Amino acid sequence: MTVIAIDGPAGSGKSTLARNLARAFGFVFLDTGAMYRALALAAQRAGIPPNDEPRLTQLAQQIEIYFVAEGDTQRVLLNGEDVSEAIRTPEISDLASRISVYPGVRRAMVALQRALASRADGVVAEGRDTTTVVFPEAIVKIYLDASPQERARRRQQQLQQQGIDEPYEKVLQEILERDARDLARADSPLRIAPDALVVQNDGWTKEQTFEHVLNLCRQRIGTTEVR
Ligand code: DC
């Protein structure tokens, strides 16, 4: 199995990049953030409070999360239900970042991520710990970064496209809070793997980021063959 792993903070453009790389190489796209989000949604629906570690761990062990391709995109299925839109609200973002601190939750999610990947010939995985914990053997490791201000601008635009209007200052505050939680948690904090290539993409378009990383991947994988 060939793995390209991409980590980085919220709003750095990991999902778009990973989706485009997966398409270019004909690999499966493993959006690990979507999995923590799906778990957060399931917890919210089950009325489990964000501080109830034992029940959240149990839920993570029982949950079924799948990705199914649909045209050029892919849908996230939670116990068979399409929750692709429901997991993209600011409320679920916040909840996902709170429940992802628990070691038991992370262990269950990492096992699920490896199981999903094991069925594929090639995977592009993205998240916070895919280069460090989930796929330490990945052939390409990218740490994608941008300043909090740039990431907040992007996130605000993304939310606007979903019909959610949030003031810039509030989005920036949320980004800073999520960064703090992602970086400070004891289990699998967001960090740069020693062998990761750091890509700082302030001021770059999605296309520029994609072209840059595509070239890095081609050099590492040793092929210029893309679909
Ligand atoms: O990338 P995202 O915004 O969809 O991720 C949602 C939350 O899930 C984020 O706050 C951190 C958490 N997460 C994680 O802890 N580990 C991952 N591999 C992916 C996401």
Image (spheres, rainbow, N blue to C red):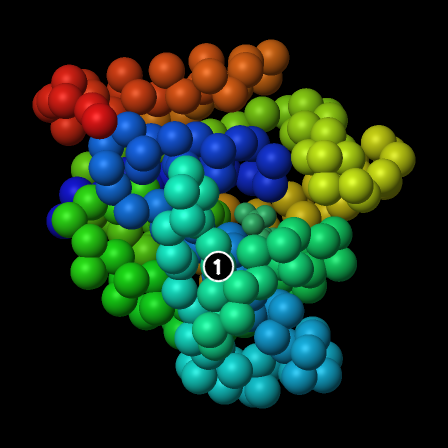
Q: Position of residue 124 (x, y in %)?
A: 31, 42
Vertical placement of residue 84 versus 39, above or below: above
State the residue in front, 8 or 14.
Answer: 14
In the image, 217: left or right of 191? left
Vertical placement of residue 141 versus 123, above or below: above
Q: Quadrant of residue 97?
A: bottom right
Q: Amino acid at mark 1?
A: Val
State the residue in front, 160 or 125.
Answer: 160
User: Which residue appears farthest toward the front when viewing the image?
Assistant: 71
Residue at coordinates 43% horizontally, 31% vertically from top-left? 17
Q: Position of residue 31 (x, y in %)?
A: 44, 50
Residue at coordinates 64% horizontally, 25% vertically from top-left? 147
Q: Secondary structure at mark 1?
A: strand
Residue that badge 1 annotates: 76
In the image, 59: left or right of 181? left
Q: Quadrant of residue 139?
A: top left
